[in-house]
Amino acid sequence: MGCVGPHAVVISSSAHKAPGRRPMTGTAQKSRVRPAVECSGIDHVVLYVRDVARSVAFYVDVLGMKVKHKSSDYAFLRCGNQLFGLFAAEGDADTGRGEELSHLAFNVPGGTSASIKKALAEHGVKATGRSADPDCIYFTDPDGHHLQIVSPDE
């Protein structure tokens, strides 16, 4: 499925309006919209962090990501088929407050929520859940970015 939204290209929406009738809406109209581009996946996500080396260690040691490229002011890690960027925050930029981003959710194959929480605790990571869904595993990285583990096995 392609990306749709306010930047999609509308193909002759008025050409399909019968005289005296309201224009089509909903599914009928959507079938006449061609996206400006076809999204095939997410290439990368970038978080701004205070200490790139500390954040690289966290994501490698805790979530098992692999370093693709690293310098003193940024790093790209491999997370499955996607890239995950960690860039040094400039000046007094506030990181991890969640104002621009709610949270990132990572797929983790295998394991139960109890075993995943135990493994996180062994790395000094405090995981929380929600009473409505105890299998949701939430935690933060060293900069306070909100993260979630999703295990398809549950």
Image (cartoon, rainbow, N blue to C red):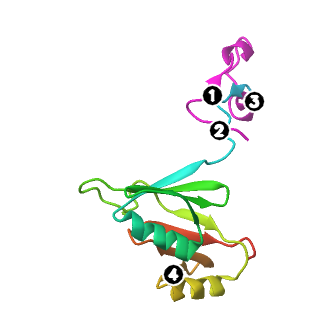
Q: Mark 1 belongs to which amino acid? A: Ala
C-alpha separation, residue under disc 4 versus residue under disc 1: 40 Å
Q: Residue at x 57, y 76 (%)?
A: 137
Residue indicated by mark 4: 127
Residue 1: assigned label:
none
Q: Mark 2 belongs to which amino acid? A: Cys
**13 part of magenta stretch:** yes
The spot of residue 115 in percent (x, y) is 65, 87
Q: Earlier in the sequence, mark 1 or mark 3?
A: 3
Magenta segment main secondary structure = loop
C-alpha separation, residue under disc 1 versus residue under disc 2: 8 Å
Asked whether the viewer can see residue 127, the reply is yes
Seen from the viewer's position, the closer of residues 57 and 69 is 69
Q: Earlier in the sequence, mark 4 or mark 3?
A: 3
Mark 3 element type = loop
Asked whether the viewer can see residue 86, the reply is no
Residue 36: assigned label:
1
User: Is the residue 40 above or below the residue 152 in the image?
Assistant: above
Q: Residue at x 40, y 70 (%)?
A: 54
Residue indicated by mark 3: 31
Residue 3: assigned label:
2
Q: Mark 4 belongs to which amino acid? A: Ala
Asked if disc 1 and disc 3 are in contact, CB closer than 8 Å, the reply is no
In the image, which is nearer the foreground, mark 2 or mark 3? 2
